Amino acid sequence: MELQDLISRLAVALGIGLLVGLERGWRRREARPGRRAAGIRTFALSGLLGGVAAALAQAFGGGSLSGGVILGVVFAGHAIVFAVFSRDENQAVGGFSATSAIAGMLTFVLGAYAVLGDLRIAAGAAVAAVVLLALREELHGWVETITWPELRSALVLLAMTFIALPIMPDDPIGPFGGVNPREVWIIAIVLAGVSFLGYAAVKYFGARRGLLLAAAAGGLVSSTAVTIANARRAAAGEGASRLLAAGVAVASGMMFLRVIAIVAVLKPALLILAAPALLAAALTVGGFAVAWMVGKSTGAPERSAVEFRNPFDLWSVVGFALFLAAIIVLGRAVGETFGTAGALTGAIVVGLADVDAVTVSMLHLTPGTLSAAPATLAILAAAASNTVTKAAIGAAIGRGWFATDLAVMTSACLTVGGAALWLTLMLPD
């Protein structure tokens, strides 16, 4: 390792120690000198010690066993000293905590990794560690207030993402391109994640802001998932149906804007045809969202408080993900069976579940297989069918005023968007 590179890495190791020590020192800033085991200087020296130990191990042992022994012996000595003094500190203040001892060991290890490994990973891990240390009160308060259904749902969602997803097969199964189990599982994760996000947002930000923030964030990924989650809330009586419908409107608006962004990135020339109808639809659903947020509820009286009883139900999420995957396969079958002439029909079918997939595929077919006008019509047809899907979900799951509101919004959206498309086609080239 060159001298300049080594100095830079040791500087990062020292910086890691200073960063951790700053948080530890600030937390114990009121303690008198000599009444705490470690502060900013000790942690800074720990990080630098880890970097120097790693440099010695690399210089004298390289990648051999002797290098590992050198690093291991220094780490063991550092850990023993830190643990002993942390124990004495706990006895002096009458407390019981291993956080400082663990933080000292981690500082040493990150300092060593800054010399031996990737500087970005070492620095990022240090920042993450300091954030966790700084959020002690918030994390403890969160643990005290979390319920078992929330914890269970969070664990299921984490297991779906970090345990099940990596081992899911990534090869399609079945005819017409088949069903990719990994893609189906990703759909299930999105559905569960959007539902959980809405639950958490309402709990921490309140009904009105929470539902709308969750809908906007969920709409960036899947407006269909937001619709399903809100329809279930409406059916269970969890919150005002008008507010839940406003969330669907916000997510729908995000969907239209998302399609515009995809077209702008991949085929900006098609924006002339696609953008007016999509923008008109987005403004329409935005108007409904504003009206439902500020207007009074109609029909049956509704509770002012929103009480979500469960973030999501695993099996219903997986079942609906399988249904959406089947819709996508059906759309592919229609497209492959009828060729180019079936592109519009296939887009309508696939659009029931996934607008982005249709948008990307149609843009890739232009201008080789499809001309601009048919490709744009297929994209708009997919967006329209997805909008109709929301009304169908509202009628099948949400029912009541929620279903009525979504039906009115869908009709207005299709009418205004269709009129904008007609005017666009009527304009001279």
Image (tube, rainbow, N blue to C red):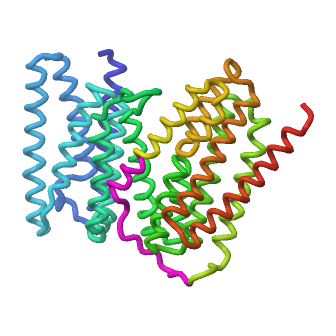
Examine the rendered structure and indicate whether residue 191 appears above or below residue 213.
above
Residue 304: within the magenta? yes
Residue 286's quadrant in the figure?
bottom right
The residue sitting at the front extreme is 337
Examine the rendered structure and indicate whether residue 98 appears above or below residue 125.
below
Q: Is residue 29 among what the camera can see?
A: no
The residue sitting at the bottom extreme is 301
**For the image shown, how many numbered marks are present on the structure?**
0
The quadrant of the picture occupied by the N terminus is: top left
Examine the rendered structure and indicate whether residue 393 appears above or below residue 209.
above
Residue 362's quadrant in the figure?
top right
Highlighted range, magenta: 301-321
Residue 425 or 289: which is nearer the viewer?
425
Residue drawn at x 67%, y 27% as measured from the top left: 341
Residue 316 or 310: which is nearer the viewer?
316
Residue 343 location, x and y as percent? 64, 30
The quadrant of the picture occupied by the C terminus is: top right
Residue 373 location, x and y as percent? 76, 31
Q: Is residue 77 left or right of residue 376?
A: left
Residue 173: within the magenta? no
Examine the rendered structure and indicate whether residue 416 appears above or below residue 232.
above
Residue drawn at x 19%, y 19% as measured from the top left: 58
Residue drawn at x 34%, y 64% as measured from the top left: 138
Residue 328 or 185: which is nearer the viewer?
328
Q: Is residue 276 among what the camera can see?
A: yes
Residue 194 location, x and y as percent? 45, 54
Residue drawn at x 12%, y 24% as measured from the top left: 68
